[in-house]
Amino acid sequence: MLDKDGIAKRIAREIKDGFYVNLGIGIPTLVANYIPAGINVELQSENGLLGMGPFPFEGEEDADLINAGKQTITTLPGSSIFDSALSFGMIRSQKIDLTILGAMEVSENGDIANWKIPGKMVKGMGGAMDLVASAKNIIVAMQHVNKAGESKLLPKCTLPLTGVNCIKKIVTELAVLDVLPGGGFKLIERAPGVSVDYIRQATTGKLFADDDVPEMIFD
């Protein structure tokens, strides 16, 4: 199985040269550390930064430079800092090529729940609603099962939805999956050493898998 960094490494392989990419809170923030060599991308943070770099080394943090998750970050040459109104203008006008988000649940129809657990205090949905409504492409970085071992890839989300029919690809500690247009998860790759049967048992939603599903490759 992959750890959180492994999930981020695999997602980083989906980023294409010239992309403008928004990284959500949680596992997605780690993707900034694994952009492949030779790939030039602009990482956007919804709190008002374009040109985000990897996390700083210990002792080199600048408390004034943070991402949407309030983690200290670095900037790259040519980066820009601006207000959140301009940032959300970029998002709502579909200037972002790829959004990478965490999730609590994803349904086989591509619905996502990632902002609220009933009964627990939350400050609000944040920018997630705008991102799922406006992004050209969305990849979810998430754990395949919850702490109780229950699947988080479901026929239908049980938590309050953030967006409907908007997720196209999911990367978990077990697998890479596409969400099919007609509904269902298509198993594309499996984590090293993880069997198709194991992934099938961990997926409550409808799962389609070929007889020979390749393992993930990390360059």
Image: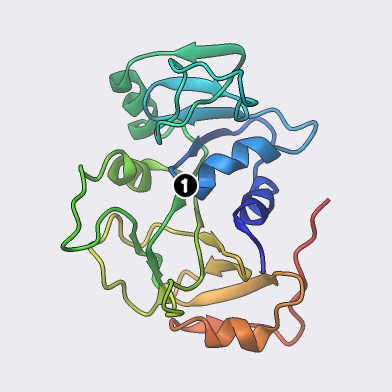
Q: Is residue 66 above or below residue 141?
A: above
What residue do we see at 47% from left, 18% from top? Answer: 65
Spot occupied by residue 30 in the image (x, y as percentages of width and height):
58, 42
Q: Could you tell me which quadrant the N terminus lies in? A: bottom right
Q: Is residue 43 above or below residue 156?
A: above
Name the residue at the left extreme: 119
Spot occupied by residue 60 in the image (x, y as percentages of width and height):
61, 18
Instruction: Decide which of 218, 186 is in the foreground and name it.
Output: 218
Q: Is residue 157 above or below residue 17?
A: below
Spot occupied by residue 50 in the image (x, y as percentages of width and height):
50, 21
Classed neighbour count for the residue bearing mark 1: other residues with Cα under 10 Å, few (<14), some (14–19), many (≥20): some
Q: Amino acid at mark 1?
A: Gly
The residue indicated by pointer 1 is 26
Instruction: Decide which of 133, 55 is in the foreground and name it.
Output: 55
Spot occupied by residue 36 in the image (x, y as percentages of width and height):
75, 38
What residue do we see at 16% from left, 62% from top? Answer: 119
The answer to whether 35 appears left or right of 100 in the picture is: right
What residue do we see at 33% from left, 28% from top? Answer: 88
Name the residue at the right extreme: 219
Instruction: Decide which of 60, 160 is in the foreground and name it.
Output: 60
What residue do we see at 47% from left, 77% from top? Answer: 184
The answer to whether 54 appears left or right of 66 in the picture is: right
Q: How is the image coloured?
A: rainbow
Mark 1, secondary structure of its residue: loop
Q: Quadrant of residue 7?
A: bottom right
